[in-house]
């Protein structure tokens, strides 16, 4: 038999070996068993991330088809870890914003092999059939337009750290007042934003941020750069827009500096201004700004230099462009963005604005921390109010907005407003004559402090004692912002007045009250 007559058997053997090799490396390309969708109905909002759970045989590959009249997509994925499950994830917003198949992924460690998409509008409102491996549809996906509910206010004690667990799980509802120093939290139930917001890389974190990112528009730019390591000292600050792409902001020669200083506590406000020290501002057509001050400026590794200037015209093309910021000899590489993806401090038109009644005190684009809870469509915004001096009785506003100049996603907004008040505690003492060793001193009161705040009842001797003694009795603020204490103390001698007050870690929060200590005979 010559070699030509052996071609069919050689080719057949080659195909078997190739198929086995591919199956062993990335999962079975085809299996006798067919995949199925675990949920018969899936409901989600446009702009959110859809999750489609698919059951397969361990290590199998499945092809999922999502279709409607004007749209269809095929997603092929492999159960890489052999647990018999593949979760297809679809960012519905991304399917609308790119002509290429985009927005599709699978949960790790499974492997996305291929995506094909037909239709120009992506996933919009309506009902879609879901089928697996060419079978008849066994599930439906219903997409609706999301809504924003009114924001809800919460608070945490000043002593708590702003962490995701504390903000989402441990905060207490509050009607409308926040004590200065406590943590203000706005909870937004906002459907249809989890696929829109750039929560992992928000444009508001860039070193240079256009207040309005629209191409070709005249706006203000905010520069933010954190100190590095030990203290950095400088008299010259230099901003360089990279000219490599020939996309520079114009009219730099007309810029007007409105804010310049150091944010010492990361609350988005300038705590040490050096705008009055600026003696020279040089600009050129190459996108370079040089600012010189009379005095040496110093910034530590935990502080941020903030600068804002107006009358700058954005370039004509959208995109992310490199830039550098220099504080004296220290150079920091960063990015500036223009266009729809950079709109809003959270990106793609999503924005949270913080403001107070009297003025816009916040210079940094993101003067707060935020956390998401996608399963229940929640965005939490948390702000430390300890730096808000001289705004007592003013309203603090946090406004969430979603704007779209084009596309199928509608504009939406939600807001919260809280009145900032001084931290105070109003105490009522049931007995002004106290037999300290044998009966309790009954104290009740109300406070503006956040629930679960730790405070102390301070009992001290009279001011005429050369070395006054002081005793502290810890209590915790109740959910309704009240407190109570029953104090029994055998260390206090009879026939002397004591002074009782409420204090926190930072000092007194209420006036002192005088209580006369008596013995049993006098009491009777």
Image: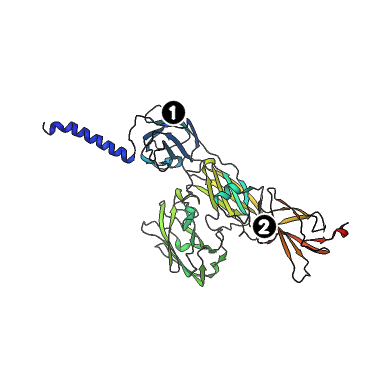
Residue at image coords 48%, 51%:
202
Q: Which residue has dot 1 on it?
A: 138
Vertical position of residue 445 compared to residue 76: above or below: below
Secondary structure, mark 1, is: loop
- The part of the image, by quadrant, that contains residue 470 is bottom right
Residue at image coords 33%, 36%:
28
Q: Which residue has dot 2 on it?
A: 392
Counting labels gives 2
Q: Percent position (x, y) of residue 102?
A: 40, 42
Q: Is residue 512 visible?
A: no
- Residue 461 appears left or right of 416: right
Q: How are the colours assigned in the image?
A: rainbow
- Residue 408 appears left or right of 168: left
Is 414 or 331 nearer to us in this picture? Answer: 331
Q: Percent position (x, y) of residue 263?
A: 55, 62
Residue at image coords 60%, 43%:
150
> Which of the numbered marks, if any, corresponds to residue 311?
none
Residue at image coords 47%, 69%:
236
Q: Percent position (x, y) of residue 75?
A: 38, 36
Vertical position of residue 93 compared to residue 330: above or below: above
């Amino acid at each position: 038999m010559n070699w030509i007559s052996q071609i069919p058997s050689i080719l057949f053997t080659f195909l078997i070996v190739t198929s086995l090799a591919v199956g062993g490396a990335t999962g079975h390309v085809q299996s006798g068993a067919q995949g199925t969708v675990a949920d018969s109905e899936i409901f989600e909002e446009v702009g959110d991330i859809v999750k489609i759970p698919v059951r397969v045989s361990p290590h199998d590959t499945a092809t999922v088809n999502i279709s409607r009249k004007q749209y269809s997509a095929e997603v092929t994925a492999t159960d890489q870890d052999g647990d018999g499950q593949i979760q297809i994830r679809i960012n519905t917003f991304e399917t609308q914003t790119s002509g290429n198949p985009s927005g599709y992924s699978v949960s790790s460690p499974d492997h996305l092999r291929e995506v094909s998409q037909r239709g120009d509008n992506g996933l919009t409102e309506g009902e879609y059939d879901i089928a697996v491996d060419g079978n008849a549809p066994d599930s439906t996906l219903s997409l609706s337009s999301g809504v924003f509910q009114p924001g809800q206010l919460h608070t945490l004690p000043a002593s708590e750290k702003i962490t995701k667990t504390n903000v989402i799980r441990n905060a207490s509802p509050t009607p409308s007042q926040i004590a200065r120093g406590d943590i203000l939290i706005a909870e937004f139930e906002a459907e249809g934003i989890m696929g829109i917001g750039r929560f992992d890389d928000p444009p508001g974190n860039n070193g240079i941020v256009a207040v309005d990112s629209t191409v070709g528009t005249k706006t203000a730019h905010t520069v933010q750069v954190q100190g590095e390591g030990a203290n950095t000292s400088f008299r010259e600050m230099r901003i360089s827009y990279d000219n490599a792409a020939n996309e520079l902001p114009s009219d730099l020669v007309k810029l007007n500096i409105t804010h310049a200083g150091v944010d010492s506590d990361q609350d988005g406000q300038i705590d040490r201004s050096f705008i009055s020290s600026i003696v020279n501002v040089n600009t050129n057509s190459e996108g370079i700004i040089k600012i010189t001050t009379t005095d040496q400026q110093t910034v530590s590794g935990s502080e941020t230099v903030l600068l804002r200037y107006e009358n700058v015209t954005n370039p004509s093309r959208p995109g992310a462009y490199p830039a550098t910021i220099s504080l004296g000899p220290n150079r920091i590489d960063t990015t500036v963005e223009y266009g729809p993806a950079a709109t809003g401090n959270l990106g793609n038109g999503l924005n949270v604005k913080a403001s107070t009644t009297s003025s816009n005190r916040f210079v940094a684009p993101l003067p707060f921390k935020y956390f998401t809870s996608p399963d229940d469509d929640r965005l939490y915004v948390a702000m430390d109010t300890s730096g808000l001096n001289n705004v007592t009785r003013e309203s603090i506003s946090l406004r969430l907005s979603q704007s779209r100049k084009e596309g199928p996603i509608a504009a939406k907004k939600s807001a919260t407003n809280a009145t900032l008040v001084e931290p105070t505690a109003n105490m009522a003492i049931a007995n002004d004559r106290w037999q300290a060793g044998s009966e309790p001193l009954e104290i009740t009161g109300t406070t503006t402090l956040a629930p679960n705040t730790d405070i102390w009842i301070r009992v001290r001797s009279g001011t005429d004692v050369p070395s006054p003694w002081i005793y502290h009795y810890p209590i915790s603020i109740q959910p309704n912002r009240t407190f109570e204490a029953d104090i029994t103390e055998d260390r206090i001698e009879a026939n002397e007045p004591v002074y009782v007050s409420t204090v926190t870690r930072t000092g007194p929060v209420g006036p002192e009250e005088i209580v006369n200590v008596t013995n049993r005979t006098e009491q009777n």
